[in-house]
Image: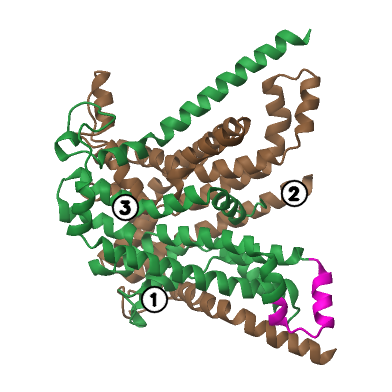
Amino acid sequence: MLTNRRKDAWIAAVLVAPFLAIYLLVFVWPTIQMFGISFTDAPLIGSGDWVGTENYERLPKDPRFRTAAWNTAYFVVLTVLPGTLIALLIGMGISRLKGRLQAAVLALFFLPYILPVSVVYFIWDWLLNFQFGLLMHILDLFGLDRIPIMKTRDWFMPAVAVVTIWWTAGFSILLFLAGLRAIPPEIYEAAALDNASRWTTFRRITWPLLWPVTSLVFTIQLISQLKIFDQVYLFSVGGRPNDNMVLVYYVFQRAFQQDQGGRAAAVAVTLFVLVVVVSVMQFQLLRMAGNRK
Amino acid sequence: MTRPRLQTVNLWGGIITVLTVLAAVLWAFPLYWGVISSLKPEDEVVRPYIELWPENLTFDHYITAITTTQIGSWYLNSVVVAVGVTVITVASSMLCGYALSQLSFPGRKALWWLILASFMVPTQALIINHFVLVSQLGLINTWAGIMLPQLIHPVIIIVYKQFFDQVPKDFREAAVMDNAGEFAILFKIYLPMNWGVTTALSIVCFIWTWNAFLWPFLSVTRTEMMTMPVGITQVNDAFGVYYARQLAAAVLAGLPVALAYLLFQRRVTEAITLSAGIKG
């Protein structure tokens, strides 16, 4: 028995080794290094001198960091809750359909999600093009003034939020559909026998039974939108990146465009801690909700 | 008594169905518009009214995009990177998931928590040190360099473990009686019983890697080493303001994943639901 145990441990070590090696190399080591250089004035490549917490103390006074933090928060507000609700509505609409029609409608909503972000960017950049974009033709039809949307400060974040919801809703819709399918039809039949109205059925059956999925979708959205970069970067090319700054963009700018690895790392650590805190809070909330049942 | 009520229900049901279908068509319209614009001659593209179907259908922009840019290299890079990442990630996760599910060894609990905890790590925050690591290894502008930081998706291990946990113990006990080793048990019993999961996870891993933007964008500076999604953002410079050509390049970049989805629709949706931690 003892030799068996020891043999098991050896085999386990062999099986786990490839994953563990990669994990240590690309997860643990860079994380430790990130914390390390955030206390130095290192450039992107190469070492620097210890500066204590100076990089962190600068952040609250740094106007660009404040813009980045504010825009990230604004973007989260614009996308997370609206995105979740839109996906829920669409998911409920699709779940009523059957067979091939359902598959076709789902595919239409889902296709954008499967595309690379730069493809999404080209499609929307073309739609919103100030001279020839389809949306501008529509504005003309209604006699409205054309707007250079991605070049206007106040329109930028809302427009990127719309594009993001369009791009990613398919994923949330899929999760809602899985959740709706898991609700036993007998419950709805019972409600119909009781002559329950549509709204009552939704409020008393669908919403509470779907709650675990809703909170899952909400959290996944929240965490991924905190890490927004790609769309903002692409739509800002040739525009006003400093006004559209978000946290990851700021890390990128400090590190890769201004060669300030240390200061960039301080921003990265802030983002890191923020995401971890949100994840832990979510985990606790889910556990509490689980215990209550 | 029930008849009038039933009718209103059906009426509302009909309206909701029609609205859903309309919304779906509207939702996909930007895709249609992008594709159709790439098939119009340049002078039609800039017409000041909405033209839903080209007067003269043309594939010229595709030919220009292919012949004047390095799309061929970008495709190759994307395929190599996406296949490489998928094979390495799925294989290493499968082995690790099996160990976690079937073997008892010291540190098993700790490893499990480590994997769960890594869910929280935002890889975007690690870009600086990924860049330092990859350049220290001399891998900037190489396939290996693009792949390295993308080789971990903890969720794949978790899904494998869940599925291995569900294989009835009888299979394992019978195999042990026959003196089969752990590797034989894994490759002859557990893996073949879970081919569906492996296919599904491979498809999502491929799609994630194909679509990755931030890291491939940072780790490559030479045009011929770019992946497809990064490369097409460079055609701006190559083309100037020829919108239809940019769109043609974009269509070429999106085509492989769009086709993969349309061909394996059920598998893809199943895989994505799995990857979110919901069992399909």
Label located before the other in sequence (1 or 3):
1
Q: How is the image coloured?
A: by chain
Residue at 40 percent of width and 65 percent of height: A266
Determine the CA span between mark 1 and mark 3.
24 Å
Give the answer, above or below, for where B117 lies relative to A234.
Answer: below
SS for callout 1: helix
- Label 1: chain? B
Tag in front: 1 or 3: 3
Element type at mark 3 = helix
Of residues A81 and A251, the one nearer the viewer is A81
Q: Can the viewer see residue A282 in this picture?
A: yes
Q: Nearer the viewer, residue B276 or A240?
A: B276
Q: Which portion, as a residue range, is magenta?
A: B168-186
Find disc 3 in the rendering and name its residue.
B252
Q: Do pointers 2 and 1 mark residues of a single chain?
A: no
- Check if mark 1's residue and mark 3's residue have beta carbons within 8 Å: no
Q: Which residue is mark 1?
A: B144
Quarter of the figure that contains the N terminus of chain A: bottom right
Question: Which disc, if any, is residue A290?
Answer: 2
**Is label 2 in contact with label 3 (beta carbons under 8 Å)?**
no
- Give, as a three-letter code, the residue at label 1: Ala
Q: Between marks 2 and 3, how big is the CA–CA gap?
A: 46 Å
- The residue lying toward the viewer, choosing from A106 and A155, is A106
Residue at 71% x, 14% y is B6
